[in-house]
Image (tube, rainbow, N blue to C red):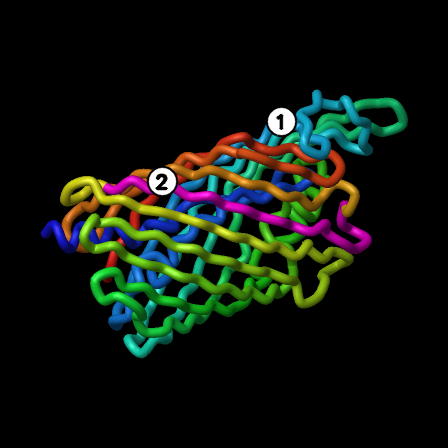
Amino acid sequence: MKRSATTLAAALAAALPSLVFASCGASFCAVNTNWTTQSAMLEAGSAFDLRYEYMHQDQPYAGSDRVAFGQIHRHHDEQSTLNRNMVGTYSRNFGNGWGVEATLPVMQRDHRHVHNHHGAQVHDAWKFTSLGDVRVAGRYQFAGIGDPLNPSTNGVTFGLKLPTGRTGIDNAQSGTAERSLQPGTGTTDLMLGAFHHQKFAARDASWFVQGSYQHALGSHDGYKPGAQLGADLGYRHGLGASWGVLAQLNFLHKRSDSGAQAEPADTGSRALYASPGVSYAVGRNMQVYAFYQHALYRKVTGVQIGADRSFVAGLSGHL
């Protein structure tokens, strides 16, 4: 039982959120729950992850500085975006190094801003629950290398973000939300990545590093999201038969959006986050976890709203 719980706990060593800025604060916690990346699993089998994300973005930033609401004049001044998302992932490993996974997000978003129109201030708001863009990815994991007592593995990932989310949601006044706020981008994006993972069996610990890149292959209705480059470094240490503590640094660089419907002057950012977490094994094949993420550094293009912290809780397991 202890060995099973420890292996399960190691599978969430990378499961930590990474925030994405946008001019309207529309964002996801990009929680990494790739079982192959995290636990170096080579045997055939299936796994799942279901997580809840909470992020309230209500602090305006200009560059790397906090600013007051409306301090830097824009056509519309962003007030806040409350994100509450459910993200489900199914992963299948075929036992020969190859695997696939699919991720389906459902987001609940409450956004408010003030439209500055010919000297008048018009308060606008959007509140919706909708399916986001589905992600489908393949991977290849190389066989374990190095010391058998401290096995390590390398792997690559590749896939597509599909345009399944809506791009034209209106509010009660028939005002269409900014494109960066919409649940979908309308574009098909190429996703590439690579990872390295190592276990230290004697002290029930593991670490990993992972890099990822995402680039839209085209535009949709005058909008093309900016390319994203991410890097994660994580460490996990077991505490007894069931508990595990985790720590990670997450870096994300997002280029500005482009197109007639984009806001290139107020999109794009660089950010670094610290992400501690805890996990608890429930039985032999299931685990609950929770994470807190805090921004260590950020620099945004133009004026954007962001959150200093976010929270993630979820359930993962083998099928």
> Residue 2's x, y, as percent?
12, 50
> Residue 287's x, y, as percent?
24, 47
Mark 2: which secondary structure?
strand
Quadrant showing the C terminus: bottom left
Is residue 256 found inside the magenta-colored segment of the image? yes
Please report the residue visible at 70 percent of the width from the left and 66 percent of the height from the top. Answer: 218
Side of 137 relative to 245 (left or right): right
Lower sequence index among marks 1 and 2: 1
Q: Name the residue under label 1.
A: 59
> Residue 51's x, y, as percent?
38, 46
- Residue positioned most to the right: 118
Question: Height in image: 152 above or below 259?
Answer: below
- Name the amino acid, label 1: Gln
- Name the amino acid, label 2: Ala
- Magenta stretch? 244-263
Measure the alpha-carbon separation of dots 1 and 2: 23 Å
Side of 23 relative to 200 (left or right): right
